[in-house]
C-alpha cells in the first residue's frame, strides 16, 4: 500500500474542502431542476418574445415596462394564446414587475 506524502495529502484535502465551499455558497448545483414557477416564468418570457414582441408582433417597437405589462395582462393587445401560454405570460409579467 502506497502512503501519500504530507504535501500531497494537504493538497488533496484542500481541493475537497474547497469544492464543498463552492457548493455551499449556492453558486453551483448538484442536480435538481427548475421549480414549476421558474419553468413557467421562463416559458412566459419565451411566449412574450414570440407572440408579443417579435418584429411582426403588435408590441415590436415598444419597450416592456410595468404599465405595458398591465395592459397585456388586461388583454390588450389581443393575441391568440393557449391556456398554458396565457398562464406562462401572466406568471412572467407578474413576477417581473411585481404586479
Image (cartoon, rainbow, N blue to C red):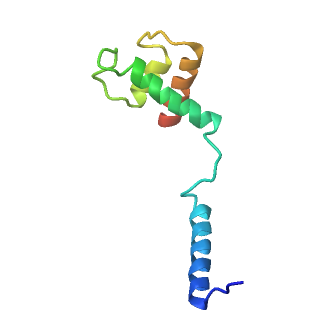
Q: Residue at x 41, y 17 (%)?
A: 51
Q: Is residue 20 or residue 89 the one in the foreground?
A: 20
Q: Residue at x 37, y 29 (%)?
A: 64
Image quadrant where residue 79 sits: top left
Q: Residue furthest front?
A: 1
Q: Position of residue 88 (x, y in %)?
A: 55, 25
Q: Is residue 94 visible?
A: no
Q: Is residue 23 visible?
A: yes
Q: Describe residue 62's horizontal placement relative to residue 99 as left or right.
A: left
Q: Residue at x 60, y 62 (%)?
A: 23
Q: Position of residue 15 (x, y in %)?
A: 57, 74
Q: Residue at x 60, y 40 (%)?
A: 34
Q: Is residue 13 or residue 77 the one in the foreground?
A: 13
Q: Position of residue 97 (x, y in %)?
A: 47, 35
Instruction: Judge whether 12 appears above or below 25 on screen.
Output: below
Q: Describe residue 64's horizontal placement relative to residue 6 as left or right.
A: left
Instruction: Judge whether 28 appears above or below 38 on screen.
Output: below
Q: Residue furthest right?
A: 1
Q: Position of residue 26 (x, y in %)?
A: 58, 58
Give the number of marks: 0
Quarter of the N terminus within the rendering: bottom right
Instruction: Judge whether 40 appears above or below 14 on screen.
Output: above
Amino acid at each position: 500500500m502506497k502512503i501519500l506524502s504530507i504535501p500531497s495529502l494537504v493538497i488533496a484535502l484542500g481541493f475537497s474542502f474547497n469544492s464543498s465551499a463552492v457548493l455551499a455558497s449556492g453558486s453551483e448545483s448538484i442536480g435538481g431542476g427548475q421549480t414549476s414557477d421558474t419553468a413557467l416564468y421562463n416559458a412566459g418570457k419565451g411566449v412574450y418574445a414570440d407572440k408579443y414582441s417579435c418584429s411582426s408582433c403588435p408590441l415590436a417597437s415598444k419597450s416592456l415596462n410595468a404599465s405595458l405589462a398591465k395592459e397585456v395582462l388586461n388583454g390588450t393587445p389581443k393575441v391568440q394564446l393557449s391556456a398554458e401560454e396565457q398562464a406562462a405570460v401572466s406568471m412572467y409579467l407578474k413576477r417581473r414587475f411585481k404586479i
